[in-house]
Structure formats: C-alpha cells, structure tokens
C-alpha cells in the first residue's frame, strides 16, 4: 500500500503525502503552485474558467480531456498528467496556435474566462484537427463568456484548426516521456490524509470491495461532478472518501449476447461512440448532459448511484430495460435499474456495496427516443426528461416502456401511459390517449426549475413529440424571435 499521491503537473512530477479528501485541484494549482492562469469562476463546474486538461492511461494509450479543476479533487489526480494554460507554447516558444488565434480574432475582453476557453479549444484542437461548427459549439458548452459573446471565440477555433501543428505540440512531442513517467507510478492502493481527513484510492475493483467492507459508510467518488459541489457549495465532510475514477476494471465496455455491459466508471464521453453506434436517436439528449468538461469527468455509474430524480441517464436506461450489477466483498447481485430507486434519497444499495456495471439490451427493431427540457439548452439541470422504447409489428404497439425524470421523487415509469399504448394501433390517436393518461402517473412538485403544471404539460407533449418524430416531421423546439 502506498502513502504518496503521485502525478505529473505540466513538465514536472508531484509527490504529496498530506492530502485531504476535500482538497481541490484548483486550490492546489493556485495556492500551492501559484499557477494562477486557472481561474475560479463558479466553484461548481458550470462556467469553465478553471478548465485544465487531464491525461490518463487506458489500455496503454494516453488520452487528454478538458475537465473542471474547481470540482476535481486533488486525490483523483493520482496517476494523471495535469496540463494547465501555463504549459501551452508555440513551436518556437511563443504563443500556442490556439492562443494566437484568440488574439487575432479578439476572442478576449476582460480576460477572466479566457484561459478556460483556451484550454477547452486546446482539447478540441488536439482531438479534432478539422472541427465543424457543431463540434466547436459542443466543445464550448461548458465555458461561459460574460463579455464578448461567442462569435470571435468560434472564429478563433476555426483559425486554430487552419493553423494546425498538432504534431509539433508539447503533448505530442513529450507523449512517450509522459507515458513512461505515468507507467512508473505503482498500481497499488494509496491512502493519504491531512489530519483526520482521509482519501483512499483502491488498486482495483476487488480491492474497492475490501475497502468498503471496512468503511461501509465511506463516500464513493467517481467523477465528482456532484460530490464536488457537496464540498464547494455545502462544505460537507466526505471523509473517508474512496476515489474510483482511476480503476481500469470499472471502465470496460463489452458487447455480447445482445447487450452492452458498461463499467460503472465509464464517463459520458467514453460511452458516446457506442451510443452513436447503437442508440443514435439518443445522441442529442446525451450531449445535453452538462458541458464537455462535465461529460469528460462524470460517470454513468455515478449518475445512477447518486439517486437523483433529475439524473439524465436513469430515464433512458429504465426505458431500455437496463439492469445493474452491484458488488461487495460478499459477492454480486443484479436488479433492474428501475428497482434500484426506492424513494427520494433512498436506493437499494446495501452497506459495502457499489455499482459495478450496467447491462443495456440492444434496441433491436424498437423505436427509441430521449428528450430533456431545461431553462438553458446546454449544461443545465433537467426540469423534466423522458425516454421511450416502443416496439411495433408495423401497425400495432407490441410493447412500450416510457420513463421520466423530474416528475417524481425517483426516476419512474409512466405505467398508465404505457398501458394506453400497449396493444393499440400505432396512430396519432393512440399517442394522444397516452398523453392524457400520463396525467395520472405523476404528481410533480413546483420548484425553481418548473411548476407542476408546466411539468404535466411537458409530460403530455413528450408523447406528441415522439409521434411527430416517428412521422419524420420537424418537431424540434425552437425559440421564436
């Protein structure tokens, strides 16, 4: 067992023994290392001013992604390469192509958010040398500008792609050196602390089960896109915290026997290529989960385990008939995703258990869809969401599974509306009947995201929208200017 946190920061190695579970990467960068290019704007992973790149080895390959340093705990950086804006440079030591493009196209005004934009565009520049407008807009979902508007920043993104030079970039030139340095860090359990504030990093999933057997009430931290706010906004004590984002055996994605098995540690971004291949109808919904930085850190297993009634993945997984595999030192058990949620704040997870994997049946010939409504189109919390899986023989609905989020204390199926669909002709009248029936399935609350009346209206309109979509009509929501 190791008692030292090790990672690379730009071009140097960092070794730390006194690290608490609540220490954030942002505070370490700014206060300890005086790398003040990384800014604190919101401390909740919303504005992107704190964006850095994190490189991690997986199956021998080194992959970099932008993340929010404000809600990234320092302990989760073990075995990673952290890259801040100070590490960027051009081939001759001047401005990096992304930075030069921001200057040329006047993409900065007050400058506070600029380093975060630069780092998000840097991540895009490395991954996609020829991005289109959609790719650029998607990459910038998690970055908010208070001054200039986004047009000059988008122009800078196009200009940086035209400038090219990825093969000469430091992350390309130094890649083998970084891989060797990260491989030199032992793959063993690591425990560090600051006083009584403890952080534990298990060696693998089996070791995680043993840790939780000793500390059944420990806080399990994967991507910290929720837990980070527990600390930065609510000042909660999460010690002892067990960090699992580095566990390779929780990141497997396997396709066999008509289903996809997803490790609980798989992030939204890591699963996106599989979603595009097997469930392309849900891609737009998926890309509205947080911003790019959040999708790079947040995990599917964490989104389920957290038990939030407005989590985006449970409605889709429930509609698709997915099952969970829970693991502890005593063994494993499986249950449908919908049965995991008992009531608000209560889930069927026993002491010492953790979500190990999610198995999702392939859709076959079923028609699927997923919808979300929120105040802001991207990077915003759900007001109401719905997912559909409807199977027909061409004229009659054989089976229907419809699940909602934001309508009850847990993600929940609309059983009355499902009954109104099953066995009925696949017609507009049938879906209109389901739209009326869903009113009896839920008694939503009014909160700052939406009123109960608005949520009920949304629920009914989701059925109408699904029907229009199946008829090939242009039904997308648009703001009328």
Image: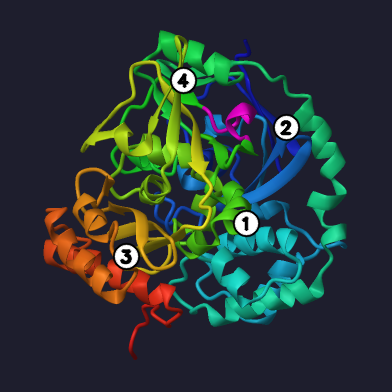
Is 409 colored magenta in this rendering? no
**Relative to 157, does residue 346 appear above or below in the rendering?**
above
User: Distance between the Cα atoms at labels 2 and 4?
Assistant: 35 Å
Element type at marker 4? strand
Camera-near label (4 vs 1) is 1
Q: Residues within 10 Å of mark 4 (few under 14, many from 20)?
A: many
Residue 8 location (% of width, % of height): 70, 36
**Relative to 106, does residue 184 appear above or below in the rendering?**
above
Residue pointed to by mark 3: 374
Q: Which residue is rendered at x = 59% and y = 76% of the image?
A: 153
The numbered disc on residue 277 is 1
Q: Earlier in the sequence, mark 4 or mark 3?
A: 4
Magenta segment range? 244-252
User: Distance between the Cα atoms at labels 2 and 3?
Assistant: 42 Å
Of 191 and 33, the residue lying toward us: 191
Q: Which residue is rendered at x = 50% and y = 10% of the image?
A: 210
User: Distance between the Cα atoms at labels 4 and 3?
Assistant: 34 Å
Q: Which of marks 2 and 3 is nearer the N terminus?
A: 2
**Relative to 460, does residue 133 appear above or below in the rendering?**
below
Q: Is the magenta stretch mostly helix, strand or loop?
A: loop
Camera-near label (3 vs 1) is 1
Q: Which residue is rendered at x = 55% and y = 66% of the image?
A: 138
The numbered disc on residue 180 is none
In the image, is 194 to the left or to the right of 335? right
Residue pointed to by mark 2: 13
Residue pointed to by mark 4: 327
Q: In which quarter of the image is residue 260?
A: top right
């Amino acid at each position: 067992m190791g008692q030292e946190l090790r990672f690379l920061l730009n071009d140097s190695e960092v070794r730390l023994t006194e690290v608490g579970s609540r220490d954030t990467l942002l505070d370490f960068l700014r206060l300890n290392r005086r790398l003040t290019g990384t800014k604190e704007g919101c401390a909740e992973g919303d504005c992107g001013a704190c964006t850095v790149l994190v490189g991690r080895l997986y199956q021998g390959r080194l992959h970099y992604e932008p993340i929010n340093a404000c809600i990234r705990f320092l302990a989760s950086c073990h075995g990673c390469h952290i890259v801040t804006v100070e590490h960027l440079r051009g081939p001759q030591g001047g401005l990096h192509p992304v930075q030069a493009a921001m200057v040329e196209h006047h993409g900065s005004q007050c400058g506070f958010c600029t380093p975060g934009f630069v780092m998000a565009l840097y991540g895009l520049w490395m991954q996609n040398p020829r991005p289109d407008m959609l790719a650029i807009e998607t990459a910038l979902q998690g970055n908010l500008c208070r001054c200039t508007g986004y047009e000059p920043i988008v122009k800078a993104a196009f200009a940086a792609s035209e400038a090219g030079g990825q093969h000469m970039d430091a992350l390309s030139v130094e890649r083998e050196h970084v891989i060797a340095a990260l491989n030199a860090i032992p793959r063993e359990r690591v425990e560090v602390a600051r006083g009584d504030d403890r952080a534990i990093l298990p060696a693998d999933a089996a070791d995680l089960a043993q840790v939780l057997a000793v500390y059944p009430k420990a806080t399990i931290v994967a991507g910290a896109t929720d837990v980070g706010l527990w600390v930065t906004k609510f000042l909660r004590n999460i010690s002892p915290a067990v960090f699992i984002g580095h566990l390779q055996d929780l990141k497997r994605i396997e396709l066999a026997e008509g289903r996809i098995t997803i490790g609980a540690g798989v992030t939204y971004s890591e699963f996106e290529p599989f979603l595009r291949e097997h469930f392309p109808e849900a891609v737009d919904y998926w890309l509205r989960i947080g911003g790019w930085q959040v999708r790079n850190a947040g995990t599917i297993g964490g989104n389920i385990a957290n038990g939030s009634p407005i989590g985006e993945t449970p409605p889709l997984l429930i509609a698709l008939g997915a099952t969970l595999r829970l693991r502890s030192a005593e063994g494993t058990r499986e249950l449908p995703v919908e049965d995991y949620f008992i009531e608000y704040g209560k889930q069927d997870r026993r002491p010492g258990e953790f979500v190990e994997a999610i198995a999702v049946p392939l859709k076959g010939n079923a028609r699927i869809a997923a919808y979300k409504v929120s105040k802001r189109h991207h990077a915003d919390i759900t007001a109401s969401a719905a997912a559909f899986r409807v199977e027909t023989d061409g004229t009659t609905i054989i089976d229907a599974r419809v699940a909602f989020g934001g309508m009850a204390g847990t993600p929940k199926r609309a059983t009355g509306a499902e009954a109104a669909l099953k066995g009925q002709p696949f017609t507009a009248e049938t879906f209109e009947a389901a739209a009326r029936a869903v009113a009896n399935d839920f008694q939503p609350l009014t909160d700052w995201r939406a009123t109960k009346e608005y949520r009920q209206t949304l629920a009914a309109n989701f059925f109408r929208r699904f029907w229009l979509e199946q008829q090939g009509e242009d039904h997308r929501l648009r703001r009328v200017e």
